Image (cartoon, helix red, strand yellow):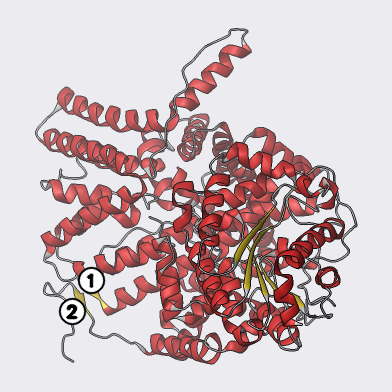
Amino acid sequence: MLFNTVEFALFFAVVFLLYHRLPMRGQNLLLLIASYVFYGAWDWRFLGLIWLSTIVDYTVARLMENATGRRRKALLLVSLCTDLGILGFFKYFNFFVDSAGMLLTSVGLEPHLPILRIILPVGISFYTFQTLAYTIDVYRGRVQAIRSPLTYGVYLAFFPQLVAGPIERAQHLLPQFTKRRHVTAEQLSSGALLILIGLVRKVVIADIVAGEVEAAFANPAGMSAPLLMRAVFLFTLQIYGDFAGYSDIARGASRMLGIELMENFNHPYFSTNITVFWRRWHISLSTWLRDYLYIPLGGNRGPKWFVYRNLMLTMLLGGLWHGAAWTFVVWGGLHGVTLALHKLYLRGRKMPDRPTINSPLDFVHTIASWVLTMFIVMLAWIFFRASDFGNAFSVIGGIVSMRGMGDISTSSLMLPVGMTALLLFIDIPQFLKRNHTVMLNWPWLMRGAVYASLVMILIILRVEEDVPFIYFQF
Amino acid sequence: MSRLSISSSDSLDLRGLRPWGLLVCLALLAVVEFGMARQDWLWSMFPKSPSGIVDVLEEQVIEPAPSPVVVILGNSRTRDAIIPAEMEEVLGVPHGSVLNLSLTAGEPYDSYVLYVRNREKLSQARVLMIAIEDWNLNDNQAISERFRRFATLSDRLGAPDWKDRLSLVAGWVWRTYDARKPLGRLLKEMVLRRDRSVPIGEDGRVVWRTDDPEFGPEDVDVSADLDHAYRGFDPSRSGEARNVEYFRRLIALATEDGLHVLLIHPPFRDKFIDKRDSAYPQARASFRAVLDELARMPGDIHVLESERASELGIAETCFLDYGHMLASGARIYTRWTATWIRDECGDALALGR
């Protein structure tokens, strides 16, 4: 069930109305049932995987509380093996077999390795990381194991964030399911506004440009350099609109149920360096990787090369998390290299979240930094979007060759310009006021006009078919 | 202020709700709904649009027509396949008495609604030619803009897919949702210049291409068209297709009005038929069964079917693509159908003269 469909609107309306008529325990039960219905609507067979992770991790965490030493470690290992085993099999089995096959072929062997037809269960990377975080935190003693299996079931399967995050932490999300919910008028309004903004980002911006991006990446050899640049730019808008739009809807729907989800995007394209970009892009994943991979690897401690190695490993694995393909690894690698270079450039200085501009030179420096950052981000997106390396290099080659530089018309610029304008209209006020629901503070007449305009844009510009969210495949 | 709550558990607390922004939003949406989406001018203001073309046909072709003898309802293939002047010559009827009202992307519902809206004039004809395609039996087709414009609530409830039904009922309640395409055109017009040209040719046919060559390519790739027409096709349920019901209704009306009904199925490139028969071997039989069922309805109903171009001596080069005929092919097909009408319905034509 996609957020951008009438079915979800009806589903959510029913859940919302029932939910606020129930006592707390009933609310959790309703959320659990609704979440399984939501997930089962895509493919009920894979509910078994969620149930398996729920049962194993709930039990492991409970047993871990009274265990010490090797037994505690062994229990953690059970959880890690179960979760990563499921993820590895369903997501990476064919990838590793393919890669091993290629490696063996390259050294002159003729391997006959098995290839299985495995359907990737939607959202598996997201809920696996969420449940892993829980057992690791219980192991570390940062979180107490939850006693109620119902609460743990809701924590793992909570439908607004089940299939594409944000990847929540137990410390933040679990306590919210154990206390009475209280949704104020302000929360209700801001939740609804987040849903509206999310739908505009997804249905208008991401879905409209998707066709153009698809056409260009499907046949880069037949495209001129300006049209390829346009496609890369449009994909930059698409991936942001799609994923940030999803996160907005998830947060909005959740807020209307009295559950606060973490912020997942904080205007990443306004970043003036790659370090800040990663503080603002897919925040729930980057902080997860920091806390459960980068820091355990050694983090910033130890010799410099050690730190850079940790950074690279984290980003490479982060790339692989997105998809079982080497193009994602390269995407992560590119970000890893630029993050390491930026760390080197900073030499231990702290990087403020926003640049301070005190002089014209600061301004020029900020603009140049932003351009460089966006160049790196867009270059990396090519590998993220491409079907394989041949496709990626065909796009890059087409741009570098500068072929058909005159092949750009005013009408072909309308889409990128229009979509950027719409995105900026939403993002600039949010960024300036550091508030995602800043529109609620606008004068009521202006607010009403903006809401009506957004609804009309949503209705008029939506594409006929419901387009799935890109991150569902991860 | 009193505590407002819809909940027994008090988890929803609506104190301090400031609905003014929402009310302004709803008021503006109501202005769009009643000032535009529910007004006919919005749908008819763009002559080249799928809905605007209906008004153009009605105003510029049907209304001025002195006395129609043959009326043709169908889609772009039929629009291309029958040349009114050629048919008038064979039948020996006055100029302007053969009306080819086929619409681009025309569907059975469009034929039905066009007849219903103009029944007084069209029922004066002697012969009604209705084009029927085998993909009309496939319910897995997108909802058209014309359907959104004209469909009644019961039409909408008859949509086979529950998601479509939901979307169509939503559009019936909130017309803005149905009118999103015309509204989009209006929005576009604010940026770009409006195209005011009228897409009707001198012979009263809808113009959807210009500068056609006399002959087309020898060979074309038909796989995409085949996939488009048959995706999701269920031959076992073809007779229950929503479109078949519109054919039934249209035939019943025409019969009631005393017209000869001729179900036509203009030819395709042989290659298209070969590929269809190999990819969808049951399609032909289910199509034939529906044609037979329609032909058995009460009234004077005939089927004039010739799906292979070679059967009529029409060369592959007489097609632009998989099934749209160029003038070279259309002349042959028109003469063939006209001769059949003259031979089989000659008395009726004489009555109408």
Mark number, residue B6:
2
Name the residue nearer the viewer: A89 or B216: B216
Q: Position of residue A178 (x, y in %)?
A: 15, 57
CB contact under 8 Å: marks 2 and 1 = yes
- Residue type pointed to by label 1: Leu
The mark found on residue B174 in the picture is none
Instruction: Say how many tags the image has.
Output: 2
Q: Which element carries disc 1, helix, strand or loop?
A: helix
On the image, the x and y values in percent for residue B284 come to: 58, 46
The answer to whether tags 2 and 1 share a subunit is no
Q: Secondary structure at mark 2?
A: loop
Q: Amino acid at mark 2?
A: Ile
Number of other residues with Cα within 10 Å of mark 1, as a class: few under 14, some 14 to 19, many 20 or more: few
- Write the residue at 62% across / 40% down: B277
Query: In the rendered view, does A254 fall on the left or right side of A436?
Result: left
CA–CA distance in space, label 2 to label 1: 9 Å
Image quarter hosting the N terminus of chain B: bottom left
Looking at the figure, which quarter contains the C terminus of chain B?
A: bottom right
Residue B293 in picture, x, y percent from top left: 50, 58
> For this rendering, which residue is in front, A38 or A323?
A38
Task: Judge left or right: residue B327 versus residue A153.
Answer: right
- The residue marked by circle 2 belongs to what chain? B
Q: Chain of mark 1?
A: A
Task: Single out the residue that lies furthest toward the front.
Answer: B347
Q: Quadrant of residue B169?
A: bottom left
Judge from the rendering whether residue B201 lies leftward or rightward of residue B244; answer left or right: right
Residue A17 - label: 1
